Image (cartoon, rainbow, N blue to C red):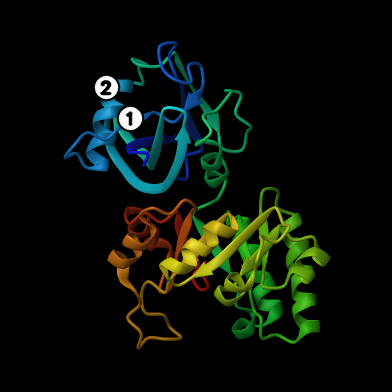
Amino acid sequence: MTRVVDVAAGVLLRGAAGGSEYLLAQRPPDKVYAGYWEFPGGKVEPGESLRAALTRELREELGIAVTAATPWLCREFTYPHARVRLKFFRVTGWLGEIDTREHSGAVWTRLDETPAAAPLLPTNSPILRALALPGIYAITHAEENGIDAELERIRQAFTRGIRLMQLRDKTLAATARRRFAEKAMTLTAAFPGTRLLVGDDETLARDIGADGVHLSSPRLRALARRPAFDWVAASCHSDADLARAECLGVDFAVLGPVLPTPTHPESPGIGWETFARLIERATIPVFALGGMHPEAIIMAEAHGAHGIALMRGW
């Protein structure tokens, strides 16, 4: 049986809104995959926590002292020499200047640009796709607010910088939901870089030219293969749901409810500790859902979430 080597890797982010650039470093000539580009980091030593390993490795490799880092994605990959399990951290604070002590070079790349650094290590390409996702996933609620009011709320949200939205509202009459979806897609097209996913209706998503679909947990369990869209998301409520989402190859998931919600205040939710345990080895970005508000993103990221999903408050 192949031994698994645990590695802590740092996705260094700098710039406004939680980071608009990320750092890639080039492996030196004397290492396996020499010349390939990667997110810096290294092997976890016996008795060392992942966070401690991250701090030590970035100090040794880049000469910096990490002051702010949150757990993020986990990826496994079998190289010719080892089976590696990488835990990626988003690093947003450090002391000192970047000094490539153990790399041939380093380059900052904007999130909205294709990296010029190539080739990338095989484990790193999915990380770049995950970095394209914003920290807030807005979910429509036209059933309660009314279609016209919700369209105005969408317009205002896009103007403020919301860039990822799910058109939910599955109890609307079919004709009303289609009209709502068409107008929402027109608004989306007016804001470059904004993505609209349609909940559980692949036909409607294709008809309006949506960026993708969002699968409910029953739909996720029923599908044999990933729908043919650029972006596919899924609602999850258990570790089995998360495993199914990863197997199907969805791009991201929402997990919850984490906290009590206005519609179900009697339910305590799974809580932050259970949420963190369930996503500890998640290979896809996971948004925290249920009882969220914009300020909760700090707590969510501290527990490993990519961000938060909001039906209200966006």
Q: Position of residue 73 (x, y in %)?
A: 42, 48
Give the farthest residue toward the right. 207
Q: Residue 207 at what x, y percent from top left?
A: 83, 66
Contact between marks 1 and 2 (CB within 8 A): the answer is yes
Picture quarter containing residue 28?
top left
Above/below status of 205 relative to 87: below
Q: Which mark is residue 60?
A: 2
Quadrant, the N terminus: top left
Spot the residue most to the front.
1
| Mark carried by residue 182 | none
The residue drawn where x is 34% and y is 47% is 70
Does 192 sit left or right of 38 as displayed? right
Q: Residues within 10 Å of mark 2 (few under 14, many from 20)?
A: some
| Residue that appears at 55% across and 28% down | 120
In the image, is residue 290 above or below residue 49? Answer: below
Residue 68 left/right relative to 186: left
For the residue carrying disc 1, how many other residues have a C-alpha within 10 Å: few (<14), some (14-19), or many (20+)? many
**Which is more N-terminal, label 2 or label 1?**
1
Residue 291 position by quadrant: bottom left
Q: Give residue 74's position: percent from left, percent from top.
A: 41, 47
Q: Which of the two residues, 122 or 266, is positioned nearer the viewer here?
A: 122
Residue found at x 48% / y 33%:
22
Could you tell me the amino acid type at mark 1? Gly
Q: Which residue is mark 1?
A: 42
For numbered disc 1, what is the local secondary structure?
A: strand
